[in-house]
Amino acid sequence: MILILLILVIPLFLSVVSLLMNNHRRLGVINSAGYLVIFLAGIKIVLNVSLGNNPIAAFNFFYCDALSAFFIFTISIICFAASLYSIGYISSDVKNGAISIKKSGVYYLLFNLFSFSMFLLVSVNNLGLMWAAMEITTLVSAFLVGFYNSKQSVEAAWKYIIICSVGIIFALLGTILFSYAFLEGGGIKTLNWAEMMLAADKLNPNIAKIAFIFILVGFGTKAGLAPMHTWLPDAHSQAVAPISALLSGVLLKTALYAILRFGIILNKSIGPGYFSHLLIFFGLLSLLISSGFIIVQKDIKRLLAYSSIEHIGLICLGIGVGGYLGLFGAFLHLFNHAVTKSLMFFSAGNIVQFFKKHSMDSIKGLFWSMPFTGAVFLLGTLAIGGLPPFSIFVSEIMIAQSIFNGGNYFLGFLILGLLAVIFGAIINHFSKIIFGVKTSSGEIIFREGLSVKLSCIFLLVFIIGLGVVIPPFFKNAINSAVKVIIN
Amino acid sequence: MTYFMVAVKRITALINSFRYQSLFLFLITLLEAWRERSIELYIVAFLLLLLKVIVIPHFLFETVRKIKVNDSLGLFVNSQLSLFFALGLTYLSVVFSRLVITDGNTFKLIAVSISFSITLIGLFIMSTRIKALAQIIGLLVMENGIFLIASSFSGGMPFFVEMAVFFDVFVSVVILGLFMYRINKLFTHIDVNKLAHLKG
């Protein structure tokens, strides 16, 4: 109980602090200290809830079971890494004159409100409030997308907010229809999903099916599922680098969390077939569309954004195929993608800050001009492509295996083929960046700040560590999250 | 009223018609509140009046005045054709509500078809008007439709969910207004069909 309040109050407190202070470096350090506490609280929540099998419920407002705990844990890690990275990144932005000192305070304010809304989203017990929290994430992060106030970034923010708002209105319609399905079937009027779970067999199946389509389209827009993904590459490429990491690493996943919450109730009432077919369909479509765009991409951050669509598609496939292995793989993949993609956006942020360009044609010879970032970027590239011994390899194999176990060989080979194509395309694009001949401006060697280095190393520990061995603590956390879904 | 919105060509007329639509919504909710004698519904109704009839239209008028944009909405699809489309969407929503309402309650059937058609027409306004402001209004119209659906289904959402939704809608309009202001400053227009810097 106290823990949940802690992770919600700290961001709010920090957002007030960021309004009052005008020393961006000290503010960044305080910020990171706060998120370190949140990170530790996240571990404690997992220990209590998942391993102690003891959901937290309070005030008829919060409810945190193993599924929420897993998401809180993931969000807290990425937020901590992003806050650490922000210290160095924002300092150099201020030094370059890209933003003023006053604006750096605004940045930290929005950063904290953004993470607050994500923590709120995964810890409330009410589907309506979950919807409201989702809308807050959009509204707050739109400012972070349009932060640099350039033509491109304002355009991206506009598209982001409009497309996601329309999507989320459909999700609201779906939520209302869903609660109507309960009213029709069992005469219960509630949006509290713990109560809905208990009454799931009373659901009116036809209305629930229609409602779920709206929900999947609505929250799927926010999750970046194709074909509702069009806002994503714009927003991710224009946002401030640490925010790109948060958007891609955890915001998309919280939308999946919302879909899962409805899916659990739906599965319990009408059986898993409907839910899984829809998820497989959208997952596969996302994989197909993103692979095409990855091959022809020229902008480094847009490429990473499309790669996020690819991985969201994979996670949906894992959830859709289901079974113990599929779900375990999907959750593991969700975590792995969060840490790996954050690392990639961090190093891409360094690159863009140094070269001042997004276009991959003008970025060459990374190894020579920025040795640390180059090395991190190389490791990240191999990891995101799915090579062993990195963690994404493990979860991708799990998802693929669950598909083959289900006897769906055509789907399995199709997905492996697509993954191979995407791997080739990513290696092709990024090897030119990393090893290419250094350009004339490459005389100066870029030195990353200590905090930037620390955040990258922090993430690398997870990326490589989980590829070698999945510690029992982590395995149990995922196991209990899977159990919430399978029951 | 929604049909009227589809037909109008000028920004000020669009905002005004949104105001009247919200006024109707307020009256319906007030009626409901009076019938059910529920204090919560009274609060919801007066928030509707305050936010959607007074504050939001006023804010939008202010923004339009400040950015000094010309009054034409810029239609991709002309008024007559738009009206025709709107009729088609209404038919679609009747079909949809037949699917959802299975208990043969005609009043509910009509209420749901009307509100669902309002939602769809909101989407239609968003996608076929050039000025960024029309997208904000379209969004608000969609939200009005959803609100009506919720109240015709089950007497509205739980109270504090309703509050949260109100808060979100209000904040999103303010934020969209701010972004429209920024777009106007950077691009010197608010024509969304010319926002095409980001591709691929």
Image (tube, coloured by chain):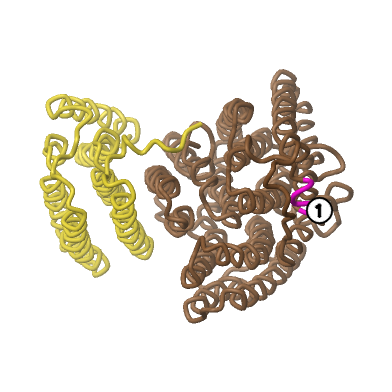
Chain colours: A brown, B yellow
Give yes or no for residue A369 being in the magenta stretch.
yes
Residue furthest to the top in view is A410
Which of the pair B103/A23 is nearer the observer? A23
- At 37% from the left and 45% from the top, the residue drawn is A162
Q: Residues within 10 Å of mark 1 (few under 14, many from 20)?
A: some
Give yes or no for residue B113 being in the magenta stretch.
no
Q: Position of residue A472 (x, y in %)?
A: 86, 57
Q: Position of residue A171 (x, y in %)?
A: 42, 45
Magenta stretch bounds:
A367-372
Camera sees residue A391 = yes
Main SS, magenta region, reads: helix
- At 53% from the left and 78% from the top, the residue drawn is A13
Q: How many marks?
A: 1
Q: Position of residue B37 (x, y in %)?
A: 20, 66
Q: Position of residue A186 (x, y in %)?
A: 43, 48
Q: Tag 1, which chain?
A: A
- At 52% from the left and 80% from the top, the residue drawn is A21
* Displayed quadrant of residue A282: top right
Q: Is residue A95 above or below residue A461?
A: below
Q: Which residue is mark 1?
A: A475
* Displayed quadrant of residue B9: top left
Which of the pair B21/A433 is nearer the observer? A433
**Label 1 is placed on what type of residue?**
Lys
Which of the pair B47/A407 is nearer the observer? B47
Name the element at disc 1: helix
- At 62% from the left and 78% from the top, the residue drawn is A26
Left or right, residue A378 beside residue B142: right
Left or right, residue A73 beside residue A265: right
Q: Is residue A242 above or below residue A397?
A: below
Q: Quadrant of the N terminus of chain A?
A: bottom right
